[in-house]
Image (spheres, rainbow, N blue to C red):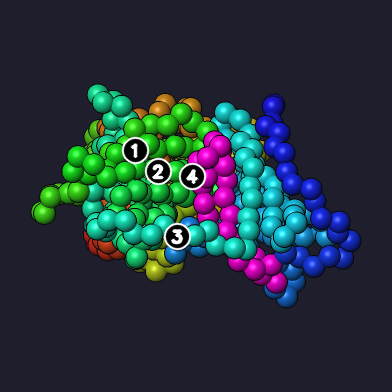
C-alpha cells in the first residue's frame, strides 16, 4: 500500500503539557494544487477532554473522538474508518493529513487550517444561485442529470446537488454574480465545483478528490418544472410476493425476515453502508421513526454492504455506526458493494441504483412503496417533504392487515 508524501511546515517546539489547540479554524484539503476544498473546524475543551466539529456552511458533523497528546491532535471519524491528524505550526496554524479506508485504497490528503478567515469575493455582477437548477454532470452523451438546490446570503451560497441515489452533501461557497465556487468535506465527500456565467447559465468543472475534472453546467429550472421524483425509480419485481432474506447481524447471528419477531409487523428495509453519507443522514430519521412507531408494530431492518470482504472489519464498522446513532433496530451484513447486485434484496427489485434504497413493507411483508436515495438536510424543502412522506407511508403500512 503506497501513501502520498506531503511537505509540511516546520513544527513548533512543544512540551508534552502544551495546551491543546482550540477555537475556530478555516481549513482546507488540497487534493490537486490550486483546487482547495474548504471546510470549517471547531475544537473545544470539555470536562473530560476535547470535542471537535467539522463545518460545511450551516452543517455540523461531530467527530467521534478528539484527542491531544501535547504534540498531535487526532480527530476520529470512526464510523467512516477515517481520521484527521494535525500538528501546530508557526503562527497558530495546524497542518497534517486526512486518511480514510475506501474500497480500492487508503486515501491520504494534506490538510491545513488557520484561524484567519479567507477574504470573501466582492460582488461583480447581479445574479443569485438561490433556487433550483437543472444540472448536467459529465461529457456530452454521457452526462448525468442532477438537480441543484441553493440558497444565497450576500455572496455566500449553500445547498447541494440531488440525484437518484441521494444528494452530494452540504455544498457551500461563494457566487459573486459571475464566478461560483462550491466545496464540501464531510469525511467522505471531497468535492469542488468551479463554474462561471455565460450562455444563459453557468458552466465549469466538478472535481472529486484528485480525479480528473468533469464538465458541469447549470441551467435555472423553469417555473413549474417538475423536480426529481425518487419514489418512482425502484419497483418490486413481484409486488404480490413477500420479501424474503436472511443474513447475519453485526454479531454474526443469523436473522431472517421469517423470524417470529417480524411476523405480522410492518417493515422498513433499507440497503445501506456505513461509508455512505446519505445512509448516515437516513439513520437519524430511521432511529426517530422506530422510537415513535415500534410499539404500534413497526420494525426496521438496515441491510449493510461494506467496502471489503473483511468480515471482522465490517462487523466493527456496523457496530460503530449503531453506537454513533443510538440504533436499536436490526442491522444485517449482506456482503460487499461488489456483490450487492447478486443478493436476495437487490434481486427482488427493478431499477435499484444504490444506497440508500428504502422499502416500505406491509404486515404481510409485501413491498408497497420504495424510495431511491435520501434527501438530506442540505436539500432544504425536499428534506422536509421526504420526512413528511416517510411518516405518511409508515402510518399507511401500519394500517395494513397481517
Q: Residues within 10 Å of mark 1 (few under 14, many from 20)?
A: some
Tag 4–tag 1 contact (CB < 8 Å): no
- Residue corresponding to mark 2: 193
Q: CA distance from mark 2 to mark 3?
A: 17 Å
Q: Is residue 213 above or below residue 179?
A: above
Badge 2 crowding class, 10 Å Cα cut-off, few under 14, some 14 to 19, many 20 or more, is many
Residue 130 in sight in this render: yes
Mark 3 or mark 4, which is nearer to you?
3
Q: Where 80 falls versus 299 (above or below)?
A: above
Question: Would you name the residue on which mark 3 appears?
Answer: 120
Marks 1 and 2: CB-CB under 8 Å?
yes
**Which label lies toward us, 1 or 3?**
3
Q: Earlier in the sequence, mark 4 or mark 1?
A: 4
The magenta span reads 22-45
| Residue position for label 4 | 189
In whole angstroms, how far apart are the C-alphas of marks 1 and 2?
A: 7 Å
Structural distance between the alpha carbons of marks 1 and 3: 20 Å
Residue 253, quarter of picture: top right
Dividing the picture into quarters, in which one does residue 136 lie? top left
Confirm whether the magenta stretch covers residue 105. no
Residue shown at the point (49%, 44%) measured from the top left: 189
Amino acid at each position: 500500500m503506497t501513501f502520498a508524501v506531503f511537505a509540511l511546515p516546520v513544527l513548533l517546539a512543544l512540551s508534552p503539557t502544551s495546551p491543546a489547540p482550540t477555537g475556530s479554524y478555516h481549513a482546507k484539503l488540497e487534493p490537486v494544487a490550486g483546487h482547495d476544498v474548504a471546510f470549517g473546524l471547531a475544537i473545544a475543551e470539555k470536562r473530560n477532554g476535547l470535542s471537535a466539529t467539522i463545518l460545511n456552511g450551516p452543517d455540523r458533523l461531530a467527530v467521534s473522538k478528539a484527542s491531544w497528546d501535547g504534540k498531535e491532535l487526532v480527530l476520529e471519524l470512526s464510523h467512516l474508518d477515517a481520521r484527521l491528524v494535525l500538528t501546530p505550526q508557526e503562527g497558530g496554524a495546524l497542518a497534517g493529513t486526512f486518511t480514510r479506508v475506501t474500497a480500492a485504497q487508503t486515501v491520504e490528503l494534506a490538510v491545513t487550517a488557520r484561524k484567519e478567515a479567507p477574504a470573501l469575493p466582492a460582488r461583480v455582477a447581479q445574479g443569485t444561485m438561490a433556487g433550483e437548477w437543472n444540472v448536467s454532470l459529465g461529457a456530452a452523451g454521457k452526462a448525468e442529470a442532477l438537480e441543484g438546490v441553493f440558497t444565497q446570503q450576500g455572496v455566500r451560497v449553500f445547498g447541494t446537488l440531488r440525484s437518484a441515489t441521494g444528494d452530494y452533501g452540504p455544498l457551500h461557497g461563494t457566487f459573486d454574480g459571475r464566478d461560483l465556487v462550491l466545496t464540501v468535506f464531510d469525511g467522505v465527500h471531497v468535492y469542488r465545483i468551479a463554474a462561471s456565467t455565460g450562455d444563459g447559465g453557468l458552466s465549469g468543472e466538478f472535481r472529486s478528490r484528485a480525479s480528473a475534472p468533469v464538465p458541469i453546467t447549470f441551467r435555472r429550472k423553469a417555473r413549474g418544472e417538475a423536480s426529481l421524483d425518487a419514489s418512482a425509480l425502484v419497483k418490486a419485481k413481484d409486488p404480490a410476493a413477500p420479501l424474503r432474506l436472511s443474513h447475519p447481524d453485526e454479531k454474526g447471528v443469523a436473522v431472517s425476515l421469517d423470524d417470529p419477531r417480524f411476523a405480522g409487523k410492518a417493515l422498513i428495509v433499507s440497503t445501506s453502508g456505513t461509508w455512505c453519507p446519505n445512509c448516515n443522514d437516513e439513520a437519524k430519521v430511521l432511529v426517530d421513526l422506530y422510537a415513535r412507531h415500534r410499539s404500534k408494530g413497526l420494525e426496521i431492518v438496515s441491510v449493510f454492504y461494506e467496502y471489503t470482504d473483511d468480515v471482522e472489519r465490517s462487523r466493527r464498522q456496523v457496530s460503530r455506526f449503531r453506537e454513533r446513532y443510538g440504533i436499536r433496530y436490526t442491522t444485517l451484513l449482506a456482503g460487499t458493494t461488489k456483490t450487492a447486485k447478486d443478493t436476495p434484496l437487490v434481486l427482488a427489485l427493478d431499477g435499484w441504483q444504490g444506497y440508500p434504497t428504502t422499502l416500505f413493507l406491509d404486515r404481510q411483508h409485501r413491498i408497497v412503496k420504495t424510495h431511491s436515495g435520501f434527501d438530506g438536510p442540505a436539500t432544504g424543502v425536499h428534506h422536509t417533504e421526504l420526512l413528511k412522506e416517510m411518516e405518511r407511508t409508515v402510518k399507511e403500512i401500519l394500517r395494513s392487515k397481517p
